[in-house]
Image: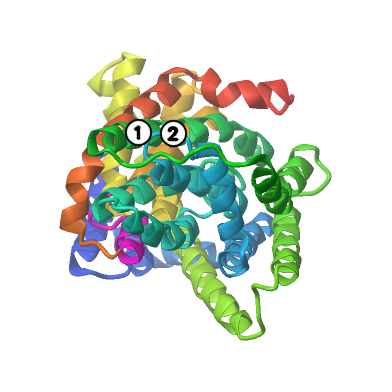
Amino acid sequence: MDSTILATLVLFGTFFFFLVLGVPISIGIGLSSFFTALTLGPIDLVLFPMTQKLFSGLDTFTFLAIPFFILSGNIMNKGGIAIRLVNFAKLLGGRLPGSLAQTNVLANMLFGSISGSSIAAAAAIGGIMAPLQEKEGYHKAYSAAVNTCSAPTGILIPPSGPLILYSLVSGGTSIAALFIAGYLPGILMGLSVMVVAGFYAVKLKYPVYGKVPFPEALKITLEAIPCMSLIVVVIGGIIAGIFTATEGAAIAVAYSLLLSIFYKELTLKNIPEIFGQSLQGSSMVLFLIATSGMMAWVMAYAGIPQFIAQLLLSISDNPIIILLVMNLALLVVGTFMDLTPAVLIFTPIFLPIAISLGMHPVHFGIMMIFNLGIGNATPPVGSVLFIACSVGKVKMQELIPFLWPFFIAIFIALMFVTFIPEISLILPKTFGLI
């Protein structure tokens, strides 16, 4: 046990030290894993399997889904799909208090459900909505807060790269079950943001749109149907077992590319930029996965997950208390660590604890991604937060006072998802996936 305690202190101590120094997370993971390996025995016995894991950890066909979904999201961002979803969202939410803010939330949910990326949603939808809201007198910080807090719905509503990643790290939890399980929690997150946005809108007396004439509503709906059909094709195909998540991701690329060409929004000039952004994003994610494989091996070899599980279970034998502690830990982790490394590092630690409490791996996965999605929107390293500030042309310090009511509402939604398993499990059960 003494060696396990030492390994735990060295692993997390050096990792956080590198974070404070500003070392890239992937490099920090690799270095902290190396230094921890030095405490575990003769270097020749631990260094070879650890470095072997750096390469073998990526040798999984399913990982190909991640760059494909990143590419499809970037194509959608440039291909005119976002504006058609915004128009459709405006049709759905136009008569609610703060019509444009509600439109922002619904558009993020729709775009996220197609692109699978909260960052892409915040950039594409926020870039369209921010000027419109400013023109109608919306406070810029309020608009950016709505965009920030609604964009993470895209990592719960499938297709979702983080859910694919969780599936692999958790030992093969059904991707189809995770995908279908993400719908209700993702919608619940979006509705919680809409409620707070509505209260703000009433208080600040923001305008409400009138009824849209039927011919115009029909035109908007018909334009949006091809975009939303991607959800039916990809998710329906995966759930029905017609193709795998990786094949579904490749179909999403082809579909979004053809649709963007049909809309005449995508030009040859955009192609190098789209592929360049996708290559950069995919490389970062896959290198993180590779180095996290090293860390996972080191943790398993040193018995760190079992040690942390015993430590956590020693706090209380009450499942409610343990789940609250796990939620708080994941919320804190999400504030300073990006979602991908957090999933890779903390799934092996917390999943066995959750299973010992009788929690289904699908339910735990949704709870975990929900938690870490909130971290995407929080300072100091929330990537969605930075994107929303950038497209909304607002400083972070102006935005933060508007964020707290949204975070409270989202946290309440998280508690519902945590303690009412059927919110996550009823759809997978209905479709016979679990």
As drawn, is 257 to the left or to the right of 54? right
As drawn, is 208 to the left or to the right of 206? right
27 lies above or below 268: above
Between residue 21 and residue 182, name the one nearer to us. Answer: 182
284 lies above or below 166: below
Callout 2 crowding tier (Cα within 10 Å): few <14, some 14–19, many ≥20: many
Callout 1 crowding tier (Cα within 10 Å): few <14, some 14–19, many ≥20: some
> In the drawing, what numbered circle is on residue 334?
none
Q: How far, Cα to Cα, is label 1 from label 2?
A: 7 Å
| Residue 160 appears in the figure | no
Which span of residues is magenta-colored? 376-392
Between residue 178 and residue 183, name the one nearer to us. Answer: 183
Please name the amino acid that badge 2 sits on: Leu
Judging by the rendered image, the residue that carries numbered circle 2 is 96
Q: Is residue 391 magenta?
A: yes
Between residue 195 and residue 163, name the one nearer to us. Answer: 195
Q: Position of residue 271 (x, y in %)?
A: 63, 80
Please name the amino acid that badge 1 sits on: Gly
Q: Is residue 132 magenta?
A: no
> In the drawing, what numbered circle is on residue 198?
1
